Image: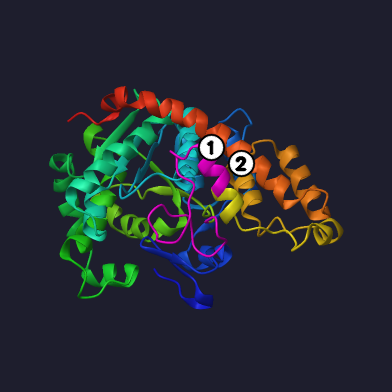
Amino acid sequence: MGEKKSNMTVNPYEVKGNVDYGRLINEFGLEKIDEDILKKIKKHTKNELHPMLRRGIFFAGRDLKWLLGEYEKGNKFFIYTGCGPSGPIHIGHLMVWYFTKWLQDKFDCELYFQFTDDEKFLYKDLSYEEVQKWTEENMLDVAAIGFNPKKTHFIIDTKHAGIMYPEAVKIAKKITFSTIKSSFGFNDSNNIGSIFYTAMQAVPAILPSILKKKNIPCLIPHAIDQDPHFRITRDILPKLGYYKPASIQCSFLPPLTGFSGKMSSSSEGVKSILSTDNPAEVKNKINKYAFSGGRDTIEEHRKLGGNPEIDVSFQYLKHFFEEDDKKLAQIEKDYKSGKLSTGELKKYTIEKINKFLGEHQERRKKAKKLVSQYILKT
């Protein structure tokens, strides 16, 4: 549901304002990931926690204790996440998907990855052909992540309609127009396809259960703005005899220009770091656009120090690009004290991002030969 207090709006189709995650936990009815949940996760990961769990980037969820309890009983879960192909992939997308790979590796899970080409055609000012082009491009980035090809299945909504639509209509029959309007802020000007779409997004949460003819728990890793879709999904699926999907939710990687909203590859005026950016482009974007928590002059910065909490370069390191907790803590300490300047922090962040993207792009070049083995066979 859209939230407008304190100039904040958070739903799948709009994120703006200063996002208050504590308030979203309360208003969305989420469960904060606490030490008890982290201990249960570590029990199955050889006492290892992903940096995004250690640092509270993935900070909330639904039914995680139940899901881990089922896993301990031998009822293994599958993972469901996805991509809306309407433009290039940015590092905010990649952050979630690399975490998803960690989950797949640690819990030996099957992954169903949905490409919602129908959604983007319905919601964006794009031709059907443009959306298909972006679907092909986005699949290269997902394949480059290195998911287990034997346990990973790409679902493209329009291509897999034959298996998805029969289940979507069963779900759609249980969802009222008033629910959709109140959840997403729709009105009479929305096209009828957009009103139906949530039923399609719910299907992958039960598709493995249908294909394997047994009830299988589902875990959905996603950014918190997608929660309204899955709240509806959780309400409906038990009425059809399936488990409610569990979820694990992350905060947004901030846009380069600061903390209002989230990073986007398609929003006009919002600069993003894309998966295909070359080193010079990354350097220029960080140096030119990355919001700084430093002082106006180097003298003032050395004396008073900077604020890492509002510094975009530091937040990129914290969210994803610096895995070493000790190194991150030292950077934070040095920046706060003024020992580390904004220019030095940006330089280090540029190096880390370019190293990561260089490796990702090498795998992306080889991904064209891999994509076909990931697409779900029907």
Would you say residue 41 is visible in this rendering? yes
Q: Which residue is mark 2?
A: 350
Residue in view at x 40 percent, y 25 percent: 148
Residue in view at x 50 percent, y 38 percent: 99
Which secondary structure, mark 2? Answer: helix
Give percent across and percent down for residue 28.
Answer: 46, 64
Q: Within the magenta stretch, is there residue 260?
A: yes
Display coloring:
rainbow
Question: 107 and 190: which one is in front?
Answer: 190
Which labelled disc corresponds to residue 252?
Answer: none
Residue 109 drawn above or below residue 120: above
Location of the N terminus by quadrant is: bottom left
Residue in view at x 28 percent, y 43 percent: 134
Question: 110 and 192: which one is in front?
Answer: 192
Give percent across and percent down for residue 152.
Answer: 34, 30
- Mark in the foreground, 2 or 1: 1
| Other-residue count near label 1 (Cα within 10 Å), few / some / many at <14 / 14–19 / ≥20 | some
Name the N-terminal-most of marks 2 and 1.
1
Secondary structure predominantly adopted by residues drawn in magenta: loop
Q: Mark 1 is on which residue type?
A: Pro
Give percent across and percent down for residue 321.
Answer: 60, 40
Residue furthest out toward the right: 303
Would you say residue 72 is visible in this rendering? no
- Hey, which quadrant is residue 21 in on the image? bottom right
Q: Which residue is mark 1?
A: 279
Q: Are marks 2 and 1 in contact (CB under 8 Å)?
A: yes
User: Bounds of the magenta span?
Assistant: 255-284
